[in-house]
Structure formats: C-alpha cells, structure tokens
Amino acid sequence: MKDQNNNPHTKYPVPPFPKQDQEVPGTEGQMKPIADHGETSYKGSGKLEGKKAVITGGDSGIGRAVAIAFAREGADVLISYLADIEDHDAEETARYVRQSGRKAVLVKGDIREEVHCKEIIAKAVSELGGIDILVNNAAYQMARREISEIPTEEWLRSFDTNIHPMFYLSKAAEPHLKPGSSIINTTSVNAYSPTPLLLPYAATKGAIQNFTANLSQILLEAGKGIRVNAVAPGPIWTPLIPSTMPEPENFGKDTPMGRPGQPIEVAVAYVFLASDEASYISGATLPVTGGRITI
C-alpha cells in the first residue's frame, strides 16, 4: 500500500519481504509483495497520442509498466516476450493496454535470433501501422559469487540476450522510424556501480551505455531525427529478482531510500524520453536508482 504522505522512503513496500524463490524467469503472480505497474495509479495525459511502440520484455516487470503507461498516454503497443511460462503475464499486460482503448499485439519468441527480431519489427509495421518508439528492455541475469561459478553458457547468453538484440532490432527498425521517433534502451545502475554478483549482466549494461551514446551520434549526424536514449534502473522489484537473486527478501534495502523501486516508478522515465517534451535529449541516460549515485 502506498504511503499517503508521499515520502519516498515509505511510498512503497519496504524490506524485509517474505522469503520466496521462483524458477527463472519468474512470474508476477508469485511475487510477495505484488509489484506496482501503475495498474490503478497511472493517469495519462496524451503525451504519446497516436504513437506506435515496440517493447521487448513487455510481459512483466518494467516492460509491463512501460506498456501500461504508453497505452494510457495514447500509444498502441507490441509486446515481445520469450516463452510459454510468460503467456499469462503477457496476456495480462495486453489486457491493460486494451482497457486503455489502445491496440496490443503479442509476439512470443527468442530475441537472441536476428530473424525473430526482424519478425517483431515486421509485425509492428503490419499490425500497428508503423513504429515510433522502440524500447529495448528484455534482459537476462544470474547471480554468481565467484567468476569460477559462471558457466560460459551464461556469459554468452547474457550478451546474446542483453546487447545483441538491441543491434538487431534497432537495425531492423531504423528504416521505419521517422523524424521525431525514439529508441530507448534499458541499461542499469550496474553500468556505473557494478554488483559483484552480476559480472556478465553488469558488463552488458556497460556495453548498452556505449551503444546508446554511439547510435545516437550516428543517427543525429545522418540527419535522421531519431533520438536514442537509455534508462538506468536501480534495484527494481520485478520477477527477475526472486528468480535470480539471493535473499530477495532484503532486495533494495541497501539503497539510500531503503527499498527497491516499483516498475511504475521507472516507467515514467520512458514516457518522458519517448515524448516530445524530450525533443532536445539524445545520447543521454536517465537514472532511476533510489538514490544510488551514477557519477
């Protein structure tokens, strides 16, 4: 329950949370407490009226909150997600989008495959009528205490999931993005202050920082009028946490605010960067970290 005083320390649930464990990639319904994606709280004001958005990892967590916020701001949304276990979460996200009077398209499959990324973009063009916003959000992580514990497969999967699809999707989408369009990538506070438990994940997030800044320069210098930015979430309460992190009951306790962020608290950053209000912002990263420093 949100604190009516709006104190950032106590606005949302504060750890310790109940002990819990999930299989990767985790689902929303098993989380304790349930995360807030803005289902009841987010009110739109037409910032993205008539826009068409693609969101990877849109079934749950930050992706779900972004999909709900975009829809309530007037955008149609394509929701990309990975596997059958996420079907229920993806359908729930689509339901909220449709309740907002916007179109929702679901595309299931593995974005590690470039051919699938091309299919996502083609589906958005054919079923939404175009693309104005690409949100590269899907990610993979596993927590390991020692480098010797990290299987090579996990290292490769981290890069194959977290950074390579940003290239595939941005490359496929670019011909369809008109001036004023926006690409928004999800990096992390780990790009600035890496968590020792997340060596492969943190490395990919540093790569995303560079990819964002570099692609922004390429597109602007070519006169494309396409802005490229990133959001750097801190510890956010999503299904990824109880399914990959040790002691999820204490997750976010070590932030200056003393709690993890909720997905809706991150979604507003994506809305801003996608909107015309951010027309002079490109190559930037907006931190949403609960007070963790990113300088």
Image (cartoon, helix red, strand yellow):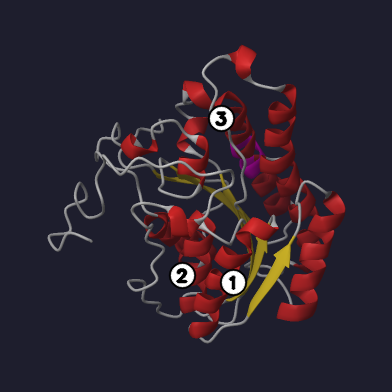
- Which residue in the structure is indicated by mark 1? 91
Q: In terms of sequence position, does the residue under pointer 3 or pointer 2 come before the other?
A: 2
Please give the name of the residue rendered at 55% of the width and 14% of the height, measured from the top-left corner.
Answer: 146
Mark seen at residue 202: 3
In magenta, the rendered stretch is 209-213
Residue 48 versus residue 101 in the image, above or below? above
Q: Is residue 73 visible?
A: no
| Residue 285, horizontal then vertical, whole percent | 50, 44
Quadrant placement of the C terminus: top left
**The residue tagged with tag 1: helix, strand or loop?**
helix
Local crowd size for mark 2, using a 10 Å CA cut-off: few (<14), some (14–19), many (≥20): many
**The residue tagged with tag 3: helix, strand or loop?**
helix
| Residue 156, horizontal then vertical, whole percent | 74, 30
Q: Nearer the viewer, mark 1 or mark 3?
A: 1
| Residue 284, horizontal then vertical, whole percent | 52, 46
Please give the name of the residue rendered at 55% of the width and 42% of the height, measured from the top-left corner.
Answer: 187
Mark 3 to mark 2: distance in Å? 27 Å
Q: Nearer the viewer, mark 2 or mark 1?
A: 1
In the foreground, 24 or 261? 24
Q: Quadrant of residue 105?
A: bottom right
Please give the name of the residue rendered at 63% of the width and 44% of the height, measured from the top-left corner.
Answer: 212
* Farthest residue, direction right: 115
| Amino acid type, label 3 | Ala
User: From the viewer's perspective, is 113 left or right of 23?
Assistant: right
Taking the magenta stretch, the answer to whether it contains residue 73 is no
| Amino acid type, label 1 | Glu
Quadrant placement of the N terminus: bottom left
Q: In terms of sequence position, does the residue under pointer 1 or pointer 3 come before the other?
A: 1
| Residue 103, horizontal then vertical, whole percent | 62, 82
Q: Main secondary structure of the magenta part?
A: helix
